[in-house]
Image (cartoon, helix red, strand yellow):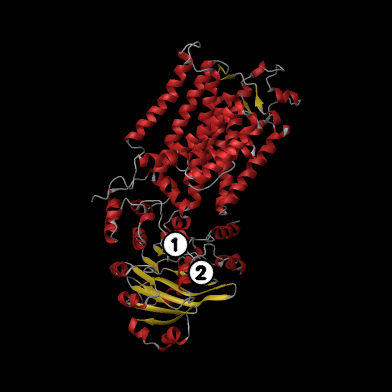
Amino acid sequence: MKAEPAVGLRALHDKSGWIALAIVSLVLCVLVPVLSLAVPASSPLHLPDYLVALFGKFLCYGIVALAIDLIWGFTGILSLGHGVFFALGGYAMGMYLMLSIGAQGVYKSVLPDFMVFLDWHELPWFWRGFDYLGVALIAALVVPGLLAFVFGYFAFRSRIRGVYFSIITQALTFALMLLFFRNETGFGGNNGLTDFKSLYGYNLHEPSTKVGLYVLSALGLLVTYLLCRYIVTSKAGRVLRAIRDAESRAMFVGFNPTTYKLFAWTLSAVLCGLAGALYVPQVGIINPGEMQPANSIEMGIWVAVGGRATLFGAVLGAFLVNGLRSFFTAAMPNAWLYVLGSLFIAVTLFFPDGVAGALGRLKRKS
Amino acid sequence: MSESSAVSNALSAEPETAPEARESAPAVRAEPATKSNEKSGKRWSVRPRLVDPERRAAVVGTRQAVLVVDNVSVSFDGFKAITDLTLILDKGELRCLIGPNGAGKTTLMDIITGKTKPDSGTVFMPHDARDLTQLKEYEIAALGICRKFQRPTVFAGHTVYENMELALTGPKGVWNSLFSRLNAEQKRTIEQILEQIGLHEHAAVRAGQLSHGQKQWLEIGMLLAQDPKVLLVDEPIAGMTHQETERTAELLKSLAGERTVVVVEHDMEFVRSIAQRVTVLHEGKVLAEGDIDSVQSNPRVVEVYLGEPRT
């Protein structure tokens, strides 16, 4: 009778886990805004605007890392094309921001500037409705989800897996990048969408708006984390891991791997769309460069560095790599790619389970 | 449209390269067997998905059959692994399948569980009209036909308890898995099976850390959790110690009666210790069938086992 403890059904978190989560949430959601808005600019504790925007960006990357951890760490499917879902979410939000510029653009037209430049006289059909924030937000989640669903349906049904799947995802993001580079596609071509002025009436250049967006991103990350944590501690999470470790065995105990993979894959894309939608108003631009194959690979590196199948490790990895990136691209711009490459090699060789795994070992030793 | 989708379904049902290989090459992961099936081109012809009731009645006769393999043949690249094989399993019996290497024992298991599609013939359960050779692996599993592989394949990263939970019979969809919690009855079932296979004290242990014998028992337990009608057990005592072998014999004997248990085994001593009924396969055909003594004294069996020099 003693064998029945929390073996089968682990709780969402144990007590210390909840406490740690609460502390991190407080720091992210309360401390940063207070340091930025309430502390006077003269104080050394004051957090400058550019840092708030930078942290906001990192939080969005954190959401992406969670999404990749769900599909790679827990389901064993390495996607090297998640940048495309991120960018699509970003574009949906960018379209709303573009239309809310109104007639304040360079050409003083209600149409976005690039359309005037292309001598278009009315909005293309697929831009209709994007003057509503709700429509844009729904599109930011549904469009990446739909693309992932259709793509995944055919890929998983045909039992494409492993490195073949990864390569196809690279091709996917590359193909869409080329498509979005074209002016005729109707998303601003090379330049993308930029020059945003306001979001739902709030001036995007105001510090308070920036902090607001930052807090929204922090909440988005928190909700995403709890959602992912719920999934991986549920029976569905155990099925995903079972499929990752022994797919045919999972099939013989009666699970259909295709639907489980499709579920994790589509959800992962939707979360990336959410991250993209939060990201774009904070950085003020979205262009096809986000869909570069290298970007998607870097997203994978975040998770590898942080540690797969741990969730918090993925977020940690995203923060860590992007922190290093911000530092190096400012201090030694030419060195960054070397640093990234060596980091990846070092992690693969010495910490195959990433920072999270190393921390875990340290904790067990002490 | 329906035809083409049926074909593509059949294609997608193509068994993937599974970790458990056939007898000839136990250590090889990728196996060419399914490929040759594709080459034969037969899968493009549309086969009836149901078995004719008259045929069913004719084959089963008055027996209390639970699973029937009817006149099945399959060849791989011209090699006839199984030829016109018919096997009828009765309710609650403990049947041993024996035969020299390459006799087609594992291939027969593959066909029953849907991993290999036969070139001709059907597999059916008498109470059900469906032809199992037309179903996907997980659909066959859902019908209560479960298989234990030669090498233990448990979910190594999951605890013993989690392994049991995943194996437990019930709805297996994504939505259900997201929200389901074990109810009291399911917990009782798990407890009971863990007791039966002697792993109740190891419930929280990761399956990967179990000994070889314990893994085998866990896998049998996982099959029991699916409440199977037919249990196919492939070489259960390979690599076991003497004590573990004895325990396994006890376990298998305790399972028969309620369920039909089919054991594939080389070890004649072990077969003698458990078998009620023995079927001897040779070169893809049934060579002899009966109780252990009559089979062992059958001159053709003696010839196959002793007459030809085999390693």
Counting from the top left corner in percent of width and height, residue A171 is at: 65, 44
Mark 2 and mark 1 residues within 8 Å of each other at the beta carbon: no
**Label 2 in the same subunit as label 1:** yes
Residue B277 position by quadrant: bottom left
Mark found first going from the N terminus, 2 or 1? 2
- Image check: B39 left or right of B121? right
Counting from the top left corner in percent of width and height, residue B299 is at: 41, 89
Are there few (<14), some (14-19), or many (20+) residues within 10 Å of tag 1? some
Return the residue nearer the eye: A313 or A343.
A343
- What residue appears at the point 43 percent right and 78 percent down from the top-left corner? B99
Vertical side of A211 occupied by A42: above or below: above
Return the residue nearer the eye: A292 or A253.
A292
Residue A84 visible in image: no
Residue A135 position by quadrant: top right
Label 2 and label 1: CA atoms lie apart by 25 Å
From the image, tell me which residue sits under label 2.
B25
